[in-house]
C-alpha cells in the first residue's frame, strides 16, 4: 500500500448538512454526479472527488490497490474533518465504499453501492485493459468499447450530449491512472468481508448492465447482513446518469430510512 494522495474534491450543499461522499466510476471524475446534486445538495453536504489517477487528483506511477484508493478517501475525510459520513459509489466508487465499510467501519454511517462488485473476475480482463492503455499511452484505445457498456442504445440516441460528456471524461483520464485503477479491480476480492459490514446498506444494479451485471449486486446484497437490493430498469452501467430520478430517490429513501437526515 502506497502513501495517500491529496484527492481533488468539490463541496456542495449547506455546510451544516449531514455529509455524503459520492465516489465515481473507473474512467470518470466527480462530474459524473452532476445529476444527483439538485436532489442531494438541497439538504446534504455533498463531497465529490476524483480517484487517484483521475481528473484533478495526482496520478502516482505503478499499480494501485483498493487499499490505496480507500486510504486516499480516509485521508480526504481527515482533511475535511469529517468523522463519519454516508457513502454512495458507482462501480469503482462502490468498491471503495465496500472496502471502507469492511476496513474502517467507524468512518461510515450508511452505504449505497450502485452497479458494482465485490469480486470481478477474470483478472485478465482488467490487466489486459491496463496493458493496452499503457502501451497506447491513452485511454482512447479502449474508449469506444467501454462507452458501449456504459449506456443503453436508447439513452445514446435520446441524450447524446450526456454520452459525449462521459466520453470526454474517459478519454481525458491519464493512461497511468486508468491502468493503475484497472489493476486495483483485477485484484479485488472483498467477499470474505461482506458479512462483517453492519452499516445500513443499499445495493442497486442496472437491468442492462453488461459490465457488472446484476449478479454482482445480488451477491453483495446476499453477503451483507440486512442489505436491501434494488434493480434499476432501463439503464446500463452508469445508471446514475441514465436514470437520475430513480437513483436519486433510492439514495434519499435509503438515507431517510437509515436516519441520515
Image (tube, rainbow, N blue to C red):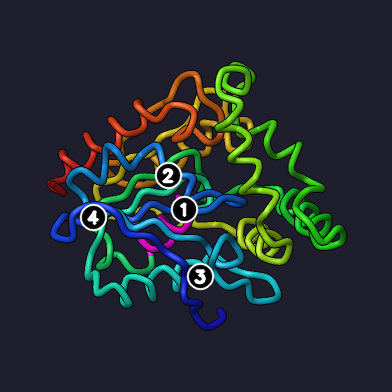
Q: Which mark is first along the chain, 2 or 3?
A: 2
Q: Which label sits in the foreground, 3 or 1?
A: 1
Residue drawn 46% across and 67% down? 8
Q: Which quadrant: the N terminus?
A: bottom right
Q: Which label sits in the foreground, 4 or 3?
A: 4
Q: Name the chief secondary structure element in magenta.
A: helix
Would you call the spot at circle 3 few (<14 residues within 10 Å), some (14-19), or many (20 or more)?
Answer: some
> Magenta includes 169?
no
Residue position marked by numbered label 1 in the rendering: 30
Residue position marked by numbered label 4 in the rendering: 45
Mark 1 to mark 4 CA distance (whole Å): 15 Å
SS label for mark 2: helix
Q: Which mark is first along the chain, 4 or 1?
A: 1
Instruction: Using the image, determine if residue 128 lies above or below residue 150.
Output: below
Mark 4 to mark 2 CA distance (whole Å): 14 Å
Taking depth in this image into account, of 65 and 27 the one nearest to the observer is: 27
Q: Position of residue 78 (x, y in %)?
A: 31, 76
Would you call the spot at circle 1 few (<14 residues within 10 Å), some (14-19), or many (20 or more)?
Answer: many
Residue drawn 73% across and 61% down? 175
Q: Which mark is first along the chain, 1 or 3?
A: 1
SS label for mark 4: strand
Task: Please state if 107 lies on the left or on the right of 221 as rendered.
Answer: left
Q: Position of residue 230 (x, y in %)?
A: 37, 29
Mark 2 to mark 1 CA distance (whole Å): 6 Å
Residue position marked by numbered label 3 in the rendering: 67
Which region is colored magenta?
94-102
State yes or no: discs 2 and 1 in contact (Cβ < 8 Å).
yes
Q: Position of residue 120 (x, y in %)?
A: 61, 47
Residue position marked by numbered label 2 in the rendering: 33
Instruction: Using the image, determine if residue 103 lies above or below residue 121.
Output: below
Amino acid at each position: 500500500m502506497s502513501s495517500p494522495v491529496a484527492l481533488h474534491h468539490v463541496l456542495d450543499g449547506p455546510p451544516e448538512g449531514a455529509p455524503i461522499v459520492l465516489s465515481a466510476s473507473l474512467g470518470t471524475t466527480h462530474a459524473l454526479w452532476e445529476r444527483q446534486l439538485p436532489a442531494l445538495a438541497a439538504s446534504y453536504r455533498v463531497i465529490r472527488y476524483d480517484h487517484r489517477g483521475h481528473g484533478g487528483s495526482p496520478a502516482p506511477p505503478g499499480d494501485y490497490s483498493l487499499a490505496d484508493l480507500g486510504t486516499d478517501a480516509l485521508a480526504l475525510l481527515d482533511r475535511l474533518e469529517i468523522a463519519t459520513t454516508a457513502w454512495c459509489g458507482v462501480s469503482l466508487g462502490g468498491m471503495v465504499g465496500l472496502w471502507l465499510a469492511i476496513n474502517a467501519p467507524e468512518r461510515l454511517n450508511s452505504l449505497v453501492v450502485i452497479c458494482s462488485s465485490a469480486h470481478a473476475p477474470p483478472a485478465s480482463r482488467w490487466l489486459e485493459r491496463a496493458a493496452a492503455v499503457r502501451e497506447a499511452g491513452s485511454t482512447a484505445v479502449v474508449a469506444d468499447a467501454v462507452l458501449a457498456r456504459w449506456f443503453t442504445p436508447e439513452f445514446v440516441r435520446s441524450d447524446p450530449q450526456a454520452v459525449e460528456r462521459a466520453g470526454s471524461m474517459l478519454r481525458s483520464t491519464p493512461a497511468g491512472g486508468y491502468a493503475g485503477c484497472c489493476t486495483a479491480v483485477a485484484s479485488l476480492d472483498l467477499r470474505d468481508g461482506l458479512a462483517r459490514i453492519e452499516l445500513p446498506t443499499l445495493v442497486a444494479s442496472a437491468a442492462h448492465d453488461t459490465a457488472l451485471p446484476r449478479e454482482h449486486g445480488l451477491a453483495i446484497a446476499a453477503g451483507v447482513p440486512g442489505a436491501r437490493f434494488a434493480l434499476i430498469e432501463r439503464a446500463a452501467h452508469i445508471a446514475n446518469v441514465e436514470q437520475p430520478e430513480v437513483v436519486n430517490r433510492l439514495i434519499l429513501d435509503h438515507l431517510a430510512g437509515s436516519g441520515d437526515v
